[in-house]
């Protein structure tokens, strides 16, 4: 059997298995993601991330993400931040400003480095959108709970509620609601004095400890409804992420820590 080196990392508990795809090929990443991500018989994670060479000459690296069900995600803010830490601390770059190629476009990463260690990474997540016919069929949304649909390169539906834990029962059904032709990430959020308490059901993965695009979608939805300012803390199960929705250009900036859990090798066959 072929064995591939990997690194398990997490951003606020949102954990993925990272492989340097510039050195190691995985021909069937969807199948490998399903097998490796299993928390009982595999490594255990929210999915598999491949760090590769970009097709766009402007970018420094590329990112592909495969969820626990084998589906390929378009974007993940936490995974992007982890890649920033990985490539810098593993000596793949000496730059503290990087361009990352993703399925939802180029994302700028800015690394805060202290004594050779990446403390936090800020990702420019781009401009949110509130109408996207490919992701949201408003005509089919009649029985959805009241919420805000936001696209952060991937689709999110944010419901403001006193009981964020209800997402455990409601998330699976809402992810596959007829209003979301490509399925949807779901956030249940409550605005408090210390930030926005948010729980997330990720499309293709279920309940996760954190979600970068989900934190951004939640913050933007709260600001749009005038429930919070354009700079806010989003408190998720695994930790706190900081989001700024810039007034000047409407770009959303996501900042938070990233951590290496362990390195290992695993069979790909």
Image (spheres, grey):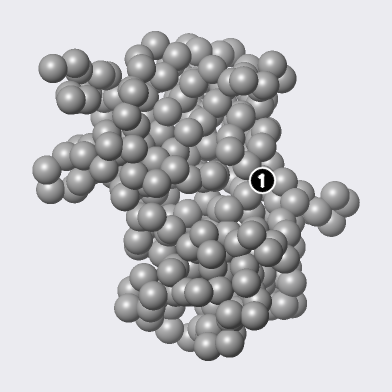
Residue at the extreme right of the image, as rendered = 248
- Write down the quadrant of residue 236 in the picture: bottom left
Can you say which quadrant of the picture contains the N terminus?
Answer: top left
Can you say which quadrant of the picture contains the C terminus?
Answer: top left
Write the residue at 35% across / 62% down: 207
Write the residue at 27% across / 37% down: 31
Task: Give left or right: position of 243 versus 169.
Answer: right
Residue 145 percent across, percent down from the top left: 53, 85
Is residue 126 visible to us here? yes
Position of 263 relative to 36 (above/below): above
* SS at badge 1: loop
Is residue 219 visible to us here? no
Task: Give left or right: position of 56 versus 77.
Answer: right
Front in this rendered view, residue 6 or 243: 6
Residue 213 percent across, percent down from the top left: 56, 53
- Write down the quadrant of residue 77 in the picture: top right
| Location of mark 1 (residue) | 125
Write the residue at 39% across / 75% down: 173
Front in this rendered view, residue 126 or 138: 138
């Amino acid at each position: 059997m072929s064995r591939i080196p990997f690194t398990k990392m997490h951003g606020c508990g949102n954990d993925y298995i990272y492989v340097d795809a510039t050195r190691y090929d995985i021909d069937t990443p969807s199948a490998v993601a399903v097998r490796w991500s299993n928390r009982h018989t595999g490594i255990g994670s929210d999915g598999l991330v491949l760090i590769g060479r970009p097709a766009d000459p402007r970018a420094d690296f590329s990112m592909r993400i495969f969820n626990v069900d084998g589906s390929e995600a378009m974007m993940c803010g936490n995974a992007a931040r982890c890649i920033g830490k990985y490539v810098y601390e593993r000596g793949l770059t000496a730059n503290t400003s990087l361009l990352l190629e993703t399925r939802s476009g180029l994302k700028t990463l800015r690394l805060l480095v202290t004594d050779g260690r990446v403390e936090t990474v800020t990702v420019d997540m781009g401009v949110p959108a509130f109408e996207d016919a490919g992701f949201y069929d408003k005509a089919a949304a009649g029985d959805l709970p009241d919420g805000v649909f936001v696209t952060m390169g991937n689709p999110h539906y944010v419901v403001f509620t006193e009981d964020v834990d209800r997402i455990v029962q409601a998330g699976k059904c809402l992810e596959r609601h007829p209003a979301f032709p490509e399925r949807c990430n779901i956030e249940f959020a409550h605005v408090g004095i210390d930030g926005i308490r948010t729980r997330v059901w990720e499309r293709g993965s279920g309940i996760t400890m954190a979600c970068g695009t989900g934190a951004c979608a939640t913050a933007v939805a709260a600001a749009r409804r005038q429930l919070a300012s354009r700079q806010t803390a989003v408190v998720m199960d695994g930790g706190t992420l900081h989001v700024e929705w810039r007034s000047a250009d409407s770009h959303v900036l996501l900042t938070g820590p990233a951590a290496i859990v362990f390195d290992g090798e695993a069979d790909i066959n």
